């Protein structure tokens, strides 16, 4: 009888059916961050246009905001994928071949750069923290469904790029009207 009760609670628990919730949260998070980053990208395009830099000679004026948005998209998705899988980052930074003094120096340098970033631009850090949290939540739900790691990364990359781009497109479409 206890086995049946355990199976019944597994089927009715919201913890086992939250893939849809985490997917909606993931897509809306990337869409909102894409929306906010689109305004920043347009601002940077205006600043670069006014500077009369060498970039203006190489890139047409209409393509500059698109290139900036693509760079923001790739950087955001790439950084969030790396930071949502901390084991990869930890093994990359702290390999066994490095001696302990150098490990300590690298750790202090790394964390001081992270703290400077956090204190100087808390709004970007909060965006990054929310994105990483939604990545981890969706990753855990997909791994619970027995997806392989490369499938999870590919799916997260495609969904994140799509939702982030959708935020960009909505910003451009609704800000023009």
Image: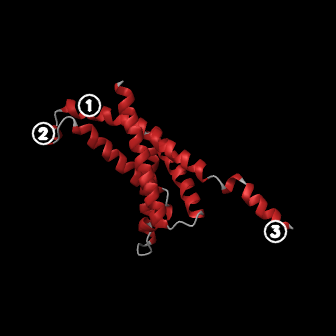
- Circle 2: is it few (<14), some (14-19), or many (20+) Cα within 10 Å? few
Task: Pick whichever, 155 or 119, lies toward us.
Answer: 155
Seen at 51% across and 53% down, the residue is: 135
Secondary structure at numbered mark 1: helix
- Circle 1: is it few (<14), some (14-19), or many (20+) Cα within 10 Å? some
Q: Is residue 157 left or right of residue 11?
A: left
Give me the C-alpha separation between circle 2 and circle 3: 71 Å
Quadrant where the N terminus is found in the figure: bottom right
Residue position for label 2: 57
Q: x, y percentage for residue 41?
A: 33, 37
Q: x, y percentage for residue 103?
A: 44, 66
What colour scheme has been applied to the protein in the rendered image? secondary structure
| Labelled disc at residue 3 | 3
Q: Does the rendering let one see residue 87?
A: yes
Seen at 67% across and 57% down, the residue is: 16
Secondary structure at numbered mark 3: helix
In this rendering, which labeled residue sits more in front, label 2 or label 3?
3
Q: Earlier in the sequence, mark 2 or mark 3?
A: 3
| Labelled disc at residue 46 | 1
| Labelled disc at residue 150 | none
In this rendering, which labeled residue sits more in front, label 3 or label 1?
3
Give me the C-alpha separation between circle 1 and circle 2: 15 Å
Secondary structure at numbered mark 2: helix
Residues at discs 3 and 1 in contact (Cβ within 8 Å) = no
Quadrant where the C terminus is found in the figure: top left
Q: Quadrant of residue 105?
A: bottom left
Q: Residue furthest right?
A: 1
Q: Is residue 4 left or right of residue 152?
A: right
Q: Earlier in the sequence, mark 1 or mark 2?
A: 1
Q: x, y percentage for residue 25?
A: 55, 45
Q: Earlier in the sequence, mark 3 or mark 1?
A: 3
């Amino acid at each position: 009888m206890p086995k049946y009760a355990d199976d019944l609670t597994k089927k009715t628990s919201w913890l086992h059916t939250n893939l849809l919730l985490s997917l909606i949260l993931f897509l809306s998070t990337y869409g909102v961050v894409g929306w906010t980053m689109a305004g920043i990208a347009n601002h940077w395009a205006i600043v670069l246009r006014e500077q009369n830099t060498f970039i203006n000679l190489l890139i047409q004026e209409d393509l500059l905001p698109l290139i900036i948005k693509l760079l923001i998209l790739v950087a955001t998705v790439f950084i969030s994928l790396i930071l949502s899988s901390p084991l990869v980052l930890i093994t990359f930074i702290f390999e066994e071949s490095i001696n302990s003094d150098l490990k300590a120096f690298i750790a202090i340098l790394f964390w001081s750069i992270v703290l400077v970033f956090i204190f100087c631009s808390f709004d970007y850090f909060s965006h990054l923290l929310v994105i990483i949290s939604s990545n981890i939540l969706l990753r855990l739900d997909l791994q619970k469904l027995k997806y392989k790691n490369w499938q999870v990364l590919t799916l997260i990359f495609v969904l994140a790029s799509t939702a982030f781009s959708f935020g960009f497109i909505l910003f451009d479409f609704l800000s023009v009207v």
